[in-house]
């Protein structure tokens, strides 16, 4: 749990492309700060009673985005939490308005495009938007979302190394932000 010096941030919200490491790094960050961890995709699956893949297959992306917004609204006031979002959360301004409420620190986990593009197929196949995407389509998606991630981020951190190294660098960056305005 963040101590009293840091109470201006009740939740840390992770945004970034699919396969950027939001969930795995989010778990490390939540353990470090002793905060609850929520994966928004897992919360959507619990709410819908089906996997994201099933939602996309049976109802389409538009219905998925509606459910995503509803679950985001349910999670937006969660305190003492790290929330890893899905890669497309930034495509709906209403989602980001909910997540950027007072008390939120939005962290853009930026991973080099070529590292994203070379993510093993078995990992990419778990993300419906990436499953059928070829290199050019993935690059277009990246170029389209990049300005949105930068627009909504309070801080940006790179995840181009291993999870542990990246998590350590992210925690160091977070510490500088979390402690910068404290009266220690």
Image (spheres, rainbow, N blue to C red):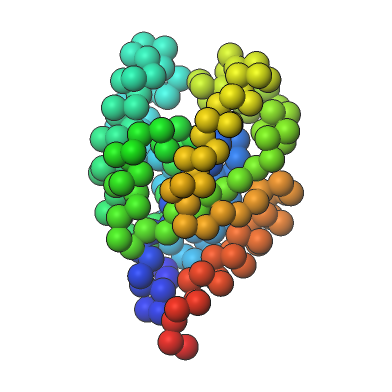
The image shows residue 3, relative to residue 36, as above or below, that is below
User: How far from the left and from the top, in percent, is residue 36?
Assistant: 41, 56
User: How far from the left and from the top, in percent, is residue 151?
Assistant: 46, 47
Quarter of the rendering occupied by the N terminus:
bottom left
Residue at left offset 71%, top offset 56%: 165
Residue at left offset 47%, top offset 88%: 184
The image shows residue 75, relative to residue 61, as above or below, that is below
- Asked if one can make out residue 27 in the rendered structure from this viewpoint, the answer is no
User: How far from the left and from the top, in percent, is residue 135?
Assistant: 68, 20
Q: Nearer the viewer, residue 135 or 36?
A: 135
Q: Residue furthest bottom?
A: 184
Please tell me in which quadrant of the rendered image residue 49 appears. top left
In the picture, measured across the screen, residue 89 lies left or right of residue 169, that is: left
In the picture, measured across the screen, residue 17 lies left or right of residue 104, that is: right
- Asked if one can make out residue 12 in the rendered structure from this viewpoint, the answer is yes
The image shows residue 173, relative to residue 128, as above or below, that is below
Please tell me in which quadrant of the rendered image residue 21 appears. top right
The image shows residue 170, relative to residue 160, as above or below, that is below
In the picture, measured across the screen, residue 146 lies left or right of residue 65, that is: right
In the picture, measured across the screen, residue 80 lies left or right of residue 127, that is: left
Count of numbered tags: 0
Q: Nearer the viewer, residue 35 or 153?
A: 153
User: How far from the left and from the top, in percent, is residue 160?
Assistant: 71, 46
Residue at left offset 35%, top offset 70%: 8
Residue at left offset 52%, top offset 40%: 147
């Amino acid at each position: 749990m963040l101590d009293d010096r840091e109470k201006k941030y009740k939740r840390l919200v992770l945004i970034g492309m699919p396969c950027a490491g939001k969930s795995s790094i989010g778990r490390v960050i939540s353990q470090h700060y002793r905060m609850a961890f929520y994966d928004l995709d897992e919360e959507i699956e619990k709410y819908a009673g089906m996997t994201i893949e099933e939602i996309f297959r049976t109802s389409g992306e538009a219905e998925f985005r509606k459910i995503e917004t509803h679950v985001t609204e349910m999670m937006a006031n969660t305190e003492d939490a790290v929330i890893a979002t899905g890669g497309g959360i930034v495509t709906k301004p209403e989602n980001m308005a909910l997540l950027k409420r007072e008390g939120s620190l939005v962290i853009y986990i930026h991973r080099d495009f070529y590292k994203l593009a070379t993510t093993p197929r078995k990992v990419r196949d778990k993300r419906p938007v990436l499953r059928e995407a070829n290199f050019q389509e993935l690059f277009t998606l990246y170029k389209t979302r990049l300005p949105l991630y930068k627009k909504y981020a309070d801080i940006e951190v790179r995840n181009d190394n291993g999870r542990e190294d990246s998590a350590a660098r992210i925690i160091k960056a977070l510490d500088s932000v979390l402690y910068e305005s404290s009266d220690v």
